[in-house]
Every structure is written in structure tokens, then in C-alpha cells.
Image (cartoon, rainbow, N blue to C red):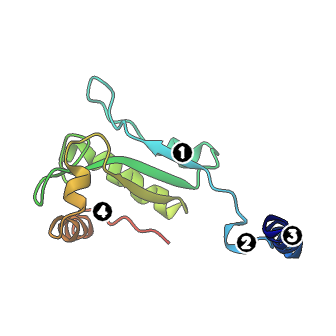
Amino acid sequence: MKSFISISALFACAFALPTSLPKRSACSAPRFVQYVQTFHTPAGKPLSLLPLLNDNTGVTHVNLAALHVNGPDKIVLNDASPNDTSFDQVWSDVAALQQGGIKVLFMIGGAAKGSYANLCGTEVPAVIVSKITTASVTLTYG
């Protein structure tokens, strides 16, 4: 008897649910996210991000990877400081992408040993925000 009542209560709740969910207007536009982790050819020649903007790709977001957190003063994009001159072309391209309406984000973490542990500490996250906002390019979202 007890199970019958429980099952009946579940059915009553299920039938009381709406048959369709309202559309979420904030998410009505599709997103096309491009993950980018390679910024140079094996010979060191910079790879441009501009085709993502200029070649009618439909990309709405670019996720730059991977920002590794190796300690309070050891934040690198792949293997070099984000302020390294090897990224000058990247930051120039990022500014053009943002001006073209593409959102640009960082992926923090990756395979670097210690990124997760460092992010869970108290000192490192504040340092990351400080370093990113004072970098030669300001990445914005929103």
C-alpha cells in the first residue's frame, strides 16, 4: 500500500510539470567556441587568429589555452609568460577579434602539475587577476 501511494504521488507530480519549457532568451543565439592552444608553427612562425574573424567562420568565442598556474609569480601561457614578445601577434589578433564582437577567454589549468592546487590556495588567484589586468592586452568578457 505504501509503495502504491508513493508511486501515485510521483505520477501526480510528473503530470503537474509543464509539458514544455519556456525558451531562454539570453541563450537563444547559438555559440560556436574555438579552442586555440597552438600559437606558432614548429619553426616559431606566429599563427594568426584573424581567419577566425575574417573567413566567415561563425565563431562567437575563442578559448585561449592553457594558462598554467605554477605559483604566485609563475603564470605561463603554455610555456612562456603572457608578456613574452612571442605573443605580440596573438595579443594584436585578440584585440581585433574583440573589436569584431568575438569573446576571448583563457582556459586556466591544463596538464601543468600544480595548477589546480595553486588555484585552490588563497594567494595565487588574486595574483592571476592582477597580472592579467595589468598585461599589455586586457581580455574582456560580457
Report the side of 77 relative to 47 (left or right).
Answer: left
Label 3 to label 2: alpha-carbon separation: 32 Å
Q: Secondary structure at mark 3?
A: helix
Label 3 to label 1: alpha-carbon separation: 55 Å
Instruction: Select label 3 or label 4 by which is in front.
Output: 3
Asked whether the beta carbons under mark 3 and mark 4 sit within 8 Å of each other, the answer is no
Label 1 to label 2: alpha-carbon separation: 27 Å
Residue under label 2 = 24
Asked whether the beta carbons under mark 3 and mark 2 sit within 8 Å of each other, the answer is no
Report the side of 25 relative to 61 (left or right).
Answer: right
Q: Residue 117 at what x, y percent from top left?
A: 21, 55
Mark 4: amino acid: Val
Quarter of image, res 43: top left
Label 1 to label 4: alpha-carbon separation: 19 Å
Residue under label 4 = 137
Q: Earlier in the sequence, mark 1 or mark 2?
A: 2
Name the residue: 55% across, 63% down.
Answer: 101
| Residue furthest out toward the front | 1
When the figure is inspected, residue 22 is found, relative to residue 77, above or below; the finding is below
Q: Secondary structure at mark 4?
A: loop
| Residue 8 tag number | 3
Q: Earlier in the sequence, mark 3 or mark 4?
A: 3
Residue under label 1 = 52
Q: Tell me if mark 3 has few (under 14), some (14-19) or many (20+) residues whose alpha carbon lies within 10 angstroms of its own.
A: few
Name the residue: 18% across, 43% down.
Answer: 80
Q: Earlier in the sequence, mark 3 or mark 1?
A: 3
Nearest the eye: 13 or 87: 13
